Image: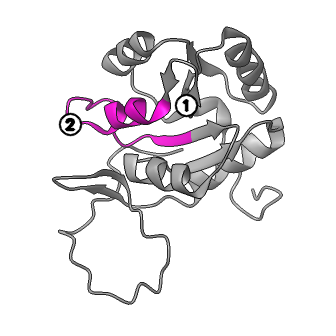
Amino acid sequence: MLGEQGMPQLDLSTVTVLLADPSQHMTTLIASMLRSIGVTKILAVNSKSGFAKALATTSFDLLLVLDRAPRWDGLPLVQMLRSKENQLTRDAHAIMMSREAMAERVTMARDAGINAFIRKPFAAKDLQVRIETAFNQPVAFVDGESYAGPDRRRRADFPGEDRRASPKPSSKPRS
């Protein structure tokens, strides 16, 4: 069955989500949006320690992480996700939520291992499209010495020589 975007319909009830935002109000709101589009397995955390504990104990398919707020920076959280110590969820899809999408910050997030950005405020339908795109159009997971995460080269017509040791497809089964 195809969805509105012509992509196969993803059963969002099978997706396990870790939602990280320091504002409990925002995690409640975004969790409500996720439930409205069919996501049922959601763990919301409001602290860096809660994020680390969740990664250490649970396997997630998707992470939604706030970019920045006072006393909060999502980039180290994504780096924690992609670290070699995190074997449960290392190759999960990661979407960064941000109030601003300045090119420099988007590049920094990409280099930390983010799959996609979504700009706040967003509607549940916008979030659904980002999630479905992440799952239906996956990018190879690269595991190198200085970088682990989705292949940062999005252009299919890359003009240079491929110098990577073969990119590994994600080992985690995707719905």
Residue 22 point in image, percent of width and height: 58, 15
Residue 97 position by quadrant = top right
How far apart are the alpha carbons under marks 1 and 2?
19 Å
Along the line of sight, the residue nearer the viewer: 50 or 73: 73
The N terminus, quarter of image: bottom right
Q: Is residue 151 magenta?
A: no
Binning the other alpha carbons within 10 Å of mark 2 as few (below 14), some (14 to 19) or many (20 upward) gives few
Q: Colour scheme used in the picture?
A: one colour
- First in residue order: circle 1 vs circle 2: 1
Q: Which mark lies nearer to you, 1 or 2?
A: 1
Residue 33 point in image, percent of width and height: 78, 27
Looking at the image, which residue is at 40% across and 47% down?
113
Tell me the residue that label 2 is attached to.
84
Residue 151 position by quadrant = bottom left
Tell me the residue that label 1 is attached to.
65
Looking at the image, which residue is at 45% across and 50% down?
108
The C terminus, quarter of image: top right
Q: Is residue 2 above or below residue 55?
A: below
Residue 25 position by quadrant = top right
- The answer to whether any part of residue 89 appears in the image is no
Side of 58 where 47 appears, left or right: right
Residue 142 point in image, percent of width and height: 30, 57
- Which amino acid is tagged 2? Lys
Looking at the image, which residue is at 74% across and 30% down?
38
Side of 70 where 60 appears, left or right: left
Magenta extent = 74-95
Q: Is residue 48 above or below residue 66?
A: above
